[in-house]
Image (spheres, rainbow, N blue to C red):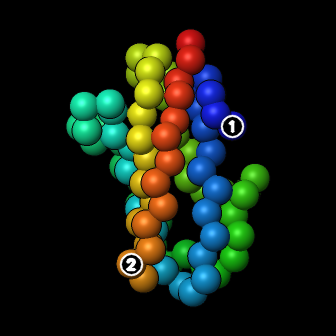
Amino acid sequence: PNPFNPSTQFPVEISQESDATLRVYDISGKKVYEQRIENMQPGVYDSNSPFVWDAQNFSSGIYMSSIELSTGEIDFNKLMLIK
């Protein structure tokens, strides 16, 4: 959910087996978090998404996230962390 506190899960839909990388950036564009999962199987990962960002040690504010698949697909989202 957005806004979130202190952690959030990232849904992703995979159409074919793929490596996937979640990246989170602060408002200045600096990468503050990265999580990589290899060989994700096709499917819809919603409440069972393996991508979770625990932002407990981060300041409130706006962040951007991207999930990039090795197939070339990229999904961007705007996040709001409220403490």
Task: Where is residue 1? Give x, y as percent.
Answer: 69, 37
Query: Could you say which quadrant of the image residue 25 lies in?
Result: top left
- Name the residue furthest right: 47
Q: Residues within 10 Å of mark 1 (few under 14, many from 20)?
A: few
Picture quadrant where residue 28 is located: top left
The answer to whether 42 is drawn above or below residue 49 in the figure is below
Residue 68 in sight here = yes
Disc 2 target residue: 72
x%, y% of residue 65? Answer: 44, 47
Which mark is first along the chain, 2 or 1?
A: 1
Q: Which residue is mark 1?
A: 1
Q: Three-letter amino acid code at disc 2?
A: Gly
State the image quarter where residue 4 is shown.
Answer: top right
**Quadrant of the drawing holding the C terminus:** top right
Q: Residue furthest bottom?
A: 16
* Residue name at image x 53 percent, y 28 percent: 80
Residue in the image at 62% along x and 45% along y = 9
Vertically, is 68 above or below 18?
Answer: above
Q: Amino acid at mark 1?
A: Pro
Is 35 placed above or below 5 here? below
Residue density around tag 2, few if under 14, some if 14–19, many if 20 or more, within 10 Å: few
- Across and down, in percent, residue 3 comes to 62, 28
Q: Residue at x 72, y 58 (%)?
A: 46
**Closer to the camera in the image, 74 or 35:** 74
Separation of residues labelled 1 and 2 (CA atoms): 26 Å
